[in-house]
Amino acid sequence: MESENDIKTTPRGFHCVLCNVNLPNQPSVDQHVKGRKHQTLSNVRTTRKTQEEHSVFVSGIKPDTSQTDLAEYFQQFGPVSDVIMDKDKGVFAIVQFSETESIQAALSCVGHQMKGLSLRVKPREKKDFKYIPKKKNDLENLQQLLDCLKPKLCQLPTVNAQMQFVVERFQLGENEKKSRGLLVLLLQEVFVEFFPDSQILPFGSSVNTFGIHSCDLDLFLDLENTKVFQARAKCPSEQATEAMSDDSRSEDSILSDIDLSTASPAKVLDLVAAILRRCVPSVHKVHVVSSARLPVVKFHHRELNLQGDITINNRLAVKNTRFLQLCSGTEDRLRPLVYTIRYWAKQKQLAGNPNGPGPLLNNYALTLLVIFFLQNCEPPVLPTVDQLKDLACEEEECVIEGWNCTFPSQSIAVPRSGNTQDLCSLLAAFFSFYAKFDFASSVISLREGRALPITDLLCHNGKIEEATDDQKPSKPNQSGPKLGPLNVLDPFELSHNVAGNLNERSQRCFQKECQEAEKYCRSLQYLRKSTKGKSWGLVRLFTPHGVTQTKPEELTISIPFKSDVLPEALRSQLRMAGDGFRLLWFEKVCTSVERVFQNILRCHLASSMDFALAEVSAADLSAEMETSTTSLNTSANDSLESVEFTENAAATGIKRRLSSGSDASVSPQGKKPRISKRGKCEPPHWLWVQKHLVWAGRRKVRRELIKETDSRPEGSCMEIESQVTAHIIQKEPELKNPLEFKVQPQLVGGTESTKVVLRLEPCCDKAGVFQDFFHFLDAFLPKMVETLLEKEVGLA
């Protein structure tokens, strides 16, 4: 019963509420319900429901209350299968029993006393299970954030001012920097008690001048001095003097249990996690991520609402942070460019990886792409890493893990660039640079400031043989970078491709978005502020894809103009029509559509819906149709034309052929067209009545009527399709409530996109069959019209 409630009827077919997907017809529904996604979600829903029916909500516990304590207490009411504790949202727990009878026993108990605590037990709240796609929510959040920025951005006078505003809006505030600094000092005081002479060094966004609100706090726990301290403490000759230092440090607890020189990183990180849990106030959600390229301990600080990472083997990252600080201090235009491009990439869903590892760009890779672009401007805005190395003095020489990390420590040592382009021009040039960039055969090198041929890294089995002596790592047989669709070498660790996580789709999306942005940056809408208060500059550039206004769903069938399938006689007629060939073709199509409904599908015209001719010029009717059907999205240079139908002859009940437009009353130039006295002109349309399910089981009937040797596709023969309809009408009973529907044809102009669009609308569908009929017509009608145009040239 619950599965049946998952499927809802919609104007275009069906919708699965559980999986949040649209389905065109009943066979698709049957297949979907049996599919893996629907079955998995159904099982999850059933499991959740079972858990709710076997659980009680317990409050009144304290942070030090353990799951074991709760399990032992509630065992008196029945077997306990699980205890789930959530201490972050108000100190409560969910106790799940194996039997439903245990719930009643627990609820009937008047007072629950456990180790001095008064527990409050009540039934678990029942919640409806609903699958919500994350991507849709992400789009809505992106649009909401842009809506907050839009008014201010539109008021600013230039794109340069808009880019500066983006920096001011998203950069870390002074209070945030101070609070992060205080947390680093607190962690330093705690860890030095367990790891003497250790250092906590922040790196990444929090300190590299590109941080944004709520960015993670990345920390490096430097244990090199602690290893020296431990080695001296273990030396017998120095044990008496070194075991106890001036501030009364001794080799207690941690250092007495672990040898840092031989312990694995995982074991050390476990100790770091234990210290965070037990000794740092307001820190919770501590866990070790050992599967990362560089294992880390993740934590969350409750008071600051701040996510943090601690690593013990990422000294190069600290140097990278210093490098970005140097670049930022050297060039004032770098920060606005980076902030703008990062936000653009987030809005276009090119960067972020919100769920951890993923195929999108990370902020560090994006920043390096910006720096590389600036290195390749004419003249260059930033120097290469090799040029920076030559500007450093002897005291600034630095080698980490065999990689040369030498560059000046002060930006004053770096000569200023002669490039005078403003931010607006540089942003447009960035998109132009990467819109044409050959990512497939290039490796981006900030050290040399140029794109290296990818063959240089492929021809030596991935080993770094091309580096100069001072660039080679000290480790033997150092592997080369992981090559992928987009390759950006770390400025110092040349074996690391910082964009190695990207797949081909992500790379294509990035370059495509750069191409789209390049086109937009050439428009006046990007360069000039709108005098009418419309969106301009960065606003449209930041608009996320997929965010559109909700509009009523229209049921339309398109019949495209295909000159290659038309018979020679009809082609000749179209050639003779000259510029009016579209109206002539439109007439032929509409005549064929009418024959399909009337002669092949045996629909009947509703005489009560006939209307008189309205004398309207083609231009006026086109404007009216364009206003009422904005969903067709016709381009500015496309024409939208329509031809009126004539009334049916009362005696025959058959409609006359459509007018070609030559008889329409056209007003003199400069005057308004003459409108019918009967009032506003109603767009031309048919109103049909269908009394039989001529689409149900049609293929089966067709196979029975034709022999096995006849393999013509459906809709390729008027005679056979008419016989199929007649057979269904003869064998199947009429609908108790006939289906009534309206069909309104329109001609969409433009030489390359000329087509006839049929808008269908149910007028009376008490039997609920219109959706199935529409989806049948969507495939059948265009093919049948094409067949009639090929063979019935003289229909008009």
Image (spheres, rainbow, N blue to C red):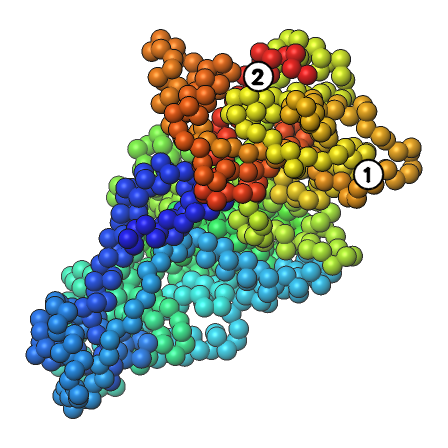
Which of the image's four quarters has the C terminus? top right
User: Looking at the image, which is closer to me, 238 or 201?
Assistant: 201
Residue 163: x, y in percent?
63, 59
Q: Nearer the viewer, residue 536 or 424?
A: 536
Taking the image as shown, residue 230 lies to the left or right of residue 633, namely: left
Q: Which residue is mark 1?
A: 676
> For residue 580, what is the image quadrant?
top right
Above or below: residue 660 compared with residue 368: above
Which of 430/27 is in front? 27
- Residue 358: percent from left, percent from top: 37, 50
Q: Residues within 10 Å of mark 1 (few under 14, many from 20)?
A: few
- Which residue type does callout 1 highlight? Ser
Q: Is residue 25 above or below residue 252?
A: above
Q: Residue furthest front?
A: 651
SS label for mark 1? loop
The location of residue 747, given as percent across then percent down, is: 68, 30
Q: Give the mark nearest the N terminus, 1 or 2.
A: 1
Q: Left of 465 or right of it: where is 99?
A: left
Asked whether disc 1 touches disc 2, contact meaning CB atoms under 8 Å apart, the reply is: no
Of badges 1 and 2, the one in the foreground is: 1
